[in-house]
Image: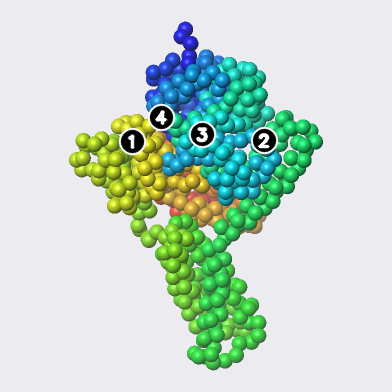
């Protein structure tokens, strides 16, 4: 048997489309090498294993029955690996065709190197800071978690966590390399005591391995002569409470292992205090970002109502209001207006003037109705209420428009397509990609095709050499690359030509379209996230409100209604689970969702069709009905289905 030069080990968990893109790029890159590719699946539920078995038959697949964690799963691959080099690779990465040719040649020339890491690019083709890091000393960690490393990203002192002393295009020795793409000499790893320490379930396992390789006498090198795309890198993670907790636990374990006991205890305690403070500020910032428009609207409506009231009683109907009367009623009116705005999607992003205006109109109608139900002593003027609502609507719309002009919020007019896109590839690829995007309900205006070849100019906007100019002339928000006519290396180079647009990559002859629409949010898999109505923020909110209000009503009326349900015990249990958010009254079963790649929802109590008929849909028709329900969801449909299937609300679907 020929000695393998490199063993590529990929641990996957529920990232089918990412895995397909990754494997497509890796299989191209290893064609000229004696190599093996090992995929360890941590019990995915998205048919990842079936994809590997059917499309990548040369890949060695280990299908775990549970989620073994990153370290343990990688070690399963190492146990059977035959390569002189081990390449630990995340499934949300893309490697260029010459990746192994360059990196392995460099490693062969430098036997003192134990670990090698490339330059990492994010989903927009920009340099990712976690390509290289320094040993996590106390102050290095403090500067990282307090945000000083980000604020002073070029500072050698404050940004030592990301090894700012080494340039992003400078080949140099560093302490730590990213575990998302880590090429390790097998002999160095053996000398360091083996691969990943399974005590680390997530985070710091790469730090530990790189440190042990250094202790074994080898060097770790950052090698930016080749780059890879990493969609979900550390630069995209938010410092959430969960992340901070895992970050602390992993670093605490590392410190206990490699620091003197007394110094380590001081380090851990101080780091815990700093992280707690950072967590507190994160929550404050998160709550402010979540409610800032809500609070702004409340303030504006209060000011408008106060001014209208003063103007009305000074000029239109002069009289004096009883003390405290306005202060008693205004909180009620504000709550109704704000609730109406919320339910009408006025706070969903991107913002919509139509939704805000509709929310204010309906809210004013409700306020007027509520005003009519108040005791006479609390009714001071219907005109004040009406004109406050009308003026408030104008002010809210005007402020949103001004904020959009300042670039602080994004407004999308009703009926307007969110983004303009251009598809890069030949005619056949462009047609196939456009059809796929349309089938998956991806809301794009396809401006045209960009040719990937200089001699293919027929019915195209231009070729990839003019990408930056095309983006500016046609105001392109998004480019979709096709892998059939473009090498991955060229795709990465073209992504670096322009910084404004977003990018997607479509694996030719596949349903996988992968990209990242934000440096702060997770990347997207469009073959797994179709634009169904049930995916919309307002649909999910309305569905949850329906579940919650119906659940509470049924809980209160249980003694009167339980006799109408076949399974009374199951009915009671389902009510509690729906209120708790573990179940939803109407929906499709998880196995049907997986089969049709529908958006995830809680486990349903009943299916989206009547059960009290002699007709029972077979599997095919169940899938069809479920897809229709997801595509055309409306909260009123849930009410109708619950009404028709009321006697079955105690069942488990």
Inspect this view and state whether residue 588 appears.
no
Residue 332 falls in which quadrant of the image? bottom right
Dots 4, 3 in contact, CB < 8 A: no
Give the residue displayed 57% in from the left and 60% down from the top: 291
The alpha-carbon separation of the residues under discs 1 and 4 comes to 14 Å
Residue 439 falls in which quadrant of the image? top left
Q: Residues within 10 Å of mark 2 (few under 14, many from 20)?
A: many
Q: Earlier in the sequence, mark 2 or mark 4?
A: 4
Q: Secondary structure at mark 1?
A: strand
In this rendering, position of residue 463 left or right of residue 278: left
User: Which of 464 and 581 lies nearest the eye of the viewer?
Assistant: 464
The residue labelled by disc 1 is: 482
Q: Secondary structure at mark 2?
A: helix
User: Which of 45 and 4 lies nearest the eye of the viewer?
Assistant: 4
Q: Secondary structure at mark 4?
A: loop
The residue labelled by disc 4 is: 96
User: Which of 594 and 67 lies nearest the eye of the viewer?
Assistant: 67
Instruction: Residue 183: give x, y in percent of width and height.
Output: 52, 25
User: Which of 415 and 581 lies nearest the eye of the viewer?
Assistant: 415
Vertical comparison of 474 with 464: above or below: below
Instruction: Residue 220: give x, y in percent of width and height.
Output: 57, 27
The residue labelled by disc 2 is: 250
Q: Earlier in the sequence, mark 1 or mark 4?
A: 4
In this view, the residue farthest toward the top is: 1
Instruction: Residue 1: give x, y in percent of width and height.
Output: 47, 7
The residue labelled by disc 3 is: 14
Q: Earlier in the sequence, mark 1 or mark 2?
A: 2
Dots 3, 2 in contact, CB < 8 A: no
Q: Secondary structure at mark 3?
A: loop
């Amino acid at each position: 048997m020929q000695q393998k030069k490199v063993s590529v080990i990929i641990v996957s968990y529920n990232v089918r489309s990412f895995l397909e893109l990754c494997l497509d790029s890796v299989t191209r890159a290893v064609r000229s090498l004696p190599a093996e590719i090992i995929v360890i699946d941590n019990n995915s539920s998205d048919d990842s294993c079936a994809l590997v078995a059917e499309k990548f038959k040369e890949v060695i697949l280990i299908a775990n029955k549970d989620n073994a964690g990153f370290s343990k799963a990688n070690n399963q691959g190492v146990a059977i690996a035959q390569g002189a080099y081990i390449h630990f690779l995340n499934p949300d990465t893309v490697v260029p065709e010459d990746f192994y040719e360059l990196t392995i040649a460099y490693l062969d020339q430098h036997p003192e190197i134990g670990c090698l890491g490339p330059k990492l690019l994010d989903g927009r083709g920009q340099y990712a800071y976690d390509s290289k890091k320094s040993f996590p000393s106390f102050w290095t960690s403090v500067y990282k978690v307090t945000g000083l490393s980000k604020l002073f990203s070029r500072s050698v002192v404050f940004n030592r966590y990301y090894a700012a002393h080494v340039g992003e295009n400078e080949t140099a020795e560093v302490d730590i390399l990213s575990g998302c793409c880590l090429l390790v000499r097998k002999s160095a790893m053996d000398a360091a005591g083996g691969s990943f320490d399974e005590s680390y379930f997530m985070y710091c396992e790469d730090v530990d391995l790189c440190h042990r390789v250094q202790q074994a006498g080898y060097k770790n090198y950052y090698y930016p002569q080749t780059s890879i795309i990493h969609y979900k890198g550390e630069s995209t993670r938010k410092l959430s409470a969960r992340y901070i907790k895992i970050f602390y636990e992993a670093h605490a374990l590392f410190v206990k292992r490699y620091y003197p006991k007394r110094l380590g205890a001081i380090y851990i305690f101080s780091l815990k205090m700093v992280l707690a403070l950072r967590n507190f500020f994160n929550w404050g910032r998160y709550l402010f970002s979540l409610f800032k428009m809500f609070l702004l609207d409340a303030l504006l409506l209060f000011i408008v109502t106060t001014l209208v009231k003063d103007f009305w009683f000074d000029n239109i109907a002069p009289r004096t209001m009883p003390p405290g009367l306005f202060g008693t009623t205004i909180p009620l009116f504000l709550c109704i207006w704000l609730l109406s705005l919320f339910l009408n999607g006025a706070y969903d992003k991107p913002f919509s003037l139509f939704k805000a205006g509709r929310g204010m109109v309906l809210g004013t109608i409700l306020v007027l109705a509520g005003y009519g139900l108040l005791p006479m002593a609390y009714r001071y003027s219907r005109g004040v209420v009406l004109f406050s609502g009308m003026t408030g609507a104008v002010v809210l719309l005007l402020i949103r428009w001004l904020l959009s002009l300042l670039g602080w919020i994004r407004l999308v007019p009703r009926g307007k397509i969110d983004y303009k896109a251009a598809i890069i590839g030949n005619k056949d690829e462009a047609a196939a990609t456009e059809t796929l995007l349309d089938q998956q309900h991806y809301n794009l205006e396809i401006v045209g095709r960009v040719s990937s070849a200089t001699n293919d100019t027929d019915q195209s906007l231009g070729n990839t050499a003019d990408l930056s100019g095309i983006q500016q002339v046609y105001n392109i928000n998004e480019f979709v690359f096709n892998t059939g006519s473009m090498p991955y290396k060229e795709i990465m180079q073209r992504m670096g030509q322009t910084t404004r647009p977003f990018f997607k990559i479509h694996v030719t002859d596949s349903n996988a379209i992968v990209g990242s629409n934000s440096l702060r949010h997770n990347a997207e898999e469009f073959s797994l996230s179709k634009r169904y109505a049930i995916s919309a923020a307002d649909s999910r909110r309305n569905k949850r409100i329906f579940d919650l209000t119906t659940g509470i009503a049924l809980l209160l009326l249980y003694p009167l209604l339980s006799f109408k349900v076949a399974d009374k015990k199951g009915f009671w249990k389902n009510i509690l689970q729906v209120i708790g958010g573990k179940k939803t009254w109407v929906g499709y079963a998880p196995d049907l969702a997986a089969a049709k790649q529908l958006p995830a929802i809680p486990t349903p109590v009943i299916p989206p069709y009547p059960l009290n008929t002699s007709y029972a849909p077979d599997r095919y028709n169940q899938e069809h009905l479920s897809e229709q329900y997801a595509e055309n969801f409306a909260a009123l449909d849930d009410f109708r289905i619950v009404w028709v299937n009321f006697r079955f609300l105690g069942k488990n679907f």
